[in-house]
Image (cartoon, rainbow, N blue to C red):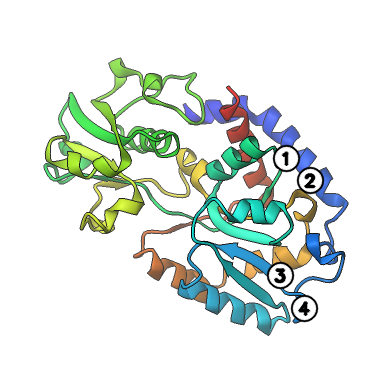
Amino acid sequence: MMTNRLRRGAAIAASAALALTLAACGGGTEESGGAAGGAEKGTEDNPVRIGVVGASDPQWEIFQDLAEEEGIFVEIENFSDYNQPNPALADGDLDLNQFQHLLYLAQYNQADDQDLTPIGATAVYPLGLYSLKHGSVEEIPEGGEVAIPNDVTNQGRALYVLEEAGLIALNDDAPLVPDPTDVDEASSKVTVTPVEANQTVVALDSVDASVVNNDFVDDAGLNPQEAIFADNAASEGARPYINVWVARAEDAENETYQRLVEIHKSPEVVEALQESSGGTASIADQSPEELQQILAEVEASLNQ
């Protein structure tokens, strides 16, 4: 079903991706760089400024060292919450940021009338299905109840997790970001109960299973490795949740920025990223064109 939805959005997505590419051509050189006034980026005097949330993560020190070995100087700027890095990038206070998935980026672009653009993929951090009553998805009985987060971002993704696990079916005309009204109840094995995201863990005592947001897994004492199901970067339902490198549209083809995306894929950086995620990160390798197409479809879906 997801494949059909992607196919229906392909024409719109391809057009939007082409527009982004054309927009990037005017500034897609190493000399572009927002507030730097055209000066070459990546030098010691004019480092590439990258906004992240969680700069203490060991991956960033390793990444900086590897970049500097290639003569690219990087300044990592830490932000305390997710609301800050996109405005800072749009305003030219940053050159890149790397903290968000595509759905979050789409919501920001729509709300603020921006065209920030993904230029590289990093990983999907799986959303897991947990149960205190059943040791596998197959053990969940017909007519069972599953709790899911009720916020827009995680609710839609939770439904895809359950669809991928074979527990529910979504209607053929379900949007890219579905809600419980898009569930084909007659074809589904379980019912879904939306609750506050932090209550999905509490609900584990009374439901057959819960889809638990990663933010609450550790606090609840759950082991990500013990989830009875989780999505991954290869699944179509997880595509809106690919974490990405983001630039201003005019800098999307900047060669220095593209090289930094490649450096971040180095084995040393990936190993540190995996350690920080407890081994749960699913590394993503979609091209910038693929990411821009997915973003365009997500944005179109949000307009429906």
Quadrant containing the C terminus is: top right
Tag 3, which secondary structure?
A: strand
Q: Quadrant of residue 5?
A: top right
Q: Residue at x 54, y 50 (%)?
A: 83
Task: Please name the residue that numbered disc 3 is placed on.
Answer: 48
What's under tag 2, amino acid-wise? Thr
CA neighbours of label 4 inside 10 A, class few (<14), some (14 to 19), many (20+): some
Which mark is on residue 17? 1
- Cα–Cα span, label 1 and label 3: 25 Å
Report if the CB atoms under discs 2 and 1 are less than 8 Å apart.
Answer: yes
- Cα–Cα span, label 1 and label 4: 30 Å
Q: Who is closer to the viewer here, 94 or 16?
A: 94
Q: Who is closer to the viewer here, 39 or 25?
A: 39
Q: Position of residue 53 (x, y in %)?
A: 51, 62
What's under tag 4, amino acid-wise? Thr
CA neighbours of label 1 inside 10 A, class few (<14), some (14 to 19), many (20+): many
Q: Which badge, 4 or 3, comes first in the chain's sequence?
A: 4
Observer-side mark, 1 or 3, equals 3
Q: Which badge, 2 or 4, comes first in the chain's sequence?
A: 2
Q: Position of residue 167 (x, y in %)?
A: 28, 31
Q: Residue furthest bottom?
A: 69
Task: Please name the residue that numbered disc 4 is placed on.
Answer: 43
Report if the CB atoms under discs 4 and 3 are less than 8 Å apart.
Answer: no
Taking 152 as reference, is 133 left or right?
left
Q: Quadrant of residue 93?
A: bottom right
Which mark is on residue 276? none
Taking 59 as reference, is 208 left or right?
left
